[in-house]
Amino acid sequence: MIKNIVLPVLLLLWPAQALAQHREPDGEILLWPNAPAPGSEALIGELEEIIVERSPEPDVIRDRYVAQITQPRLQVFRPENPNGSALLMIPGGGYQRVVLDKEGYESAEALNEDGVTVFVLIYRLPHEGHENSRDVPLQDAQRAMRVIRSQADEYSVDPDRVGVIGFSAGGHVAGSLTTRFDADVYAPRDSADTLSARPDASMLMYAVTRLSGPAVHEGSRDRLVGPDPSQETLAVYDIAEAARADAPPLFILHAINDTSVPLPNGMDVFNAFMDLGALVELHVFDTGGHGFGIRHTTGLPVAAWPDMVSAWMARHGLMGEAAAD
C-alpha cells in the first residue's frame, strides 16, 4: 500500500510554462518483479512507501516526492515519434527522497519532444534500513539499464543507444553507474542480468559527485556513506576519485550560483575524466542555482538544457537521423 500525503506549505509563484495539463506515465516496469529487491527482504511489510505532495496548488502544478521505497520501478514516457534512443532518468532528492515531478515527469516530457524514450527511475534510498545500503541505489540503476535493454523491442528502443541522465543526488547515482557499471553489487536474477549495465552516454545535471572537501553536499554524503568516509570508501563512491578512462561519454552541466551542490562537483569530475582521456564536456552557467529541472528555468540561458542534451546525444550517435539533423 502506498500512502499519499499532502503537506501544508506556503504559496509559491509557479512559472507560466508549468501550468500545463498533467501527464501520466505511459507504463510502469517493476525492476524486481518476482521477489523482493536484494537486501530489502526484511523491510517488506515494515516500510510503507509514501508519496508526498508539497505543492500549494496540486491541481495546477504537482511537486511530489517518493520515500520509503521497497519496490523500485521505472515510469515510462514514450515519445510520439521515437527515434530509437532512450534515457534512464534518475531524479534527485538528497538521498532522502526521490523527486517525482520536477526532475522526473516534466524533464521526461521535454526530452520526449526530441524522440527520446525516457524511463524515470524510482530507486531505493540508502538510509532506510536496506542491507548493503551504500549500493542499493546502484543495484537499482544497474538493474534498470539491463531491464531497459531486455525490453528494448517492446519500447522501440535500440539497446545500443541507452544513456543515463541524473539530477543532484540522482546525478550521483548516474555517476556511480558511469564508474561502477560492472561492479558486482547483486546476484543475477534472470536473463536480463546477462546484459551490460554500461550506459552508452552519461549526463550529470548539477550532480552530487564529491563526498569530501568544501564542495561536499553533506546530507547526501551522510545518508550514503556516513559523515566521515575513509579514503578507501571515497575511492569507490566519490565520482571524481572513481573516474575511469573507459567510461561512456560524459555531459556535465552546472550553475556557478549553485549553493547546495557547489560548482566543483561538476568541474572536479570534468577534470578527473579529461585527465584520463575520457570523452567529457562541461557546461557552466552563471545563473540557475540548484534543482531547476524544467520549471525554474524561465527566462534563463539554462532553459536550453534539453536541447543541448539532445544535440550532444546526436553528436555521439545516440539519436536517430531525423533528430540529429
Image (cartoon, grey):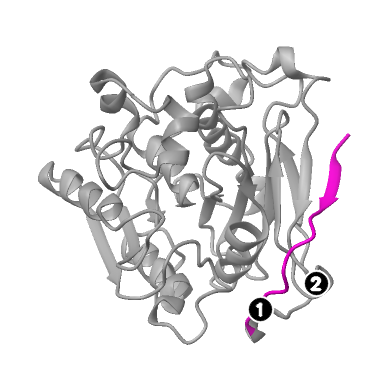
Look at the image and tell me whether residue 194 can be seen: no
- Give the residue drawn at x 76%, y 20%: 34
* Secondary structure under the numbered disc 1 in the rendered image: loop
The residue where tag 1 is placed is: 14
Name the amino acid type tagged 1. Trp
Identity of the residue furthest to the right in this view: 1
Q: Is residue 200 left or right of residue 102?
A: left
Foreground residue, 276 or 214?
214
- Image quadrant holding the C terminus, namely bottom left
Main SS, magenta region, reads: loop
Percent of width and height locating residue 43 = 74, 18
* Secondary structure under the numbered disc 2 in the rendered image: loop
**CB of mark 2 within 8 Å of CB of mark 1?**
yes
- Image quadrant holding the N terminus, namely top right
Using the image, tell me which numbered label, if any, was put on residue 233: none
Q: Quadrant of residue 176?
A: top left
Look at the image and tell me whether residue 90 can be seen: yes
- Give the residue drawn at x 56%, y 16%: 188
What segment carries the magenta color?
1-15
The residue where tag 2 is placed is: 57
Q: Is residue 246 left or right of residue 175?
A: left
Residue density around tag 2, few if under 14, some if 14–19, many if 20 or more, within 10 Å: some
Foreground residue, 263 or 139?
263
Percent of width and height locating residue 10 = 72, 69
- Give the residue drawn at x 33%, y 24%: 229
Q: Is residue 230 left or right of residue 182?
A: left
Name the amino acid type tagged 2. Glu
Q: Quadrant of residue 262?
A: bottom left
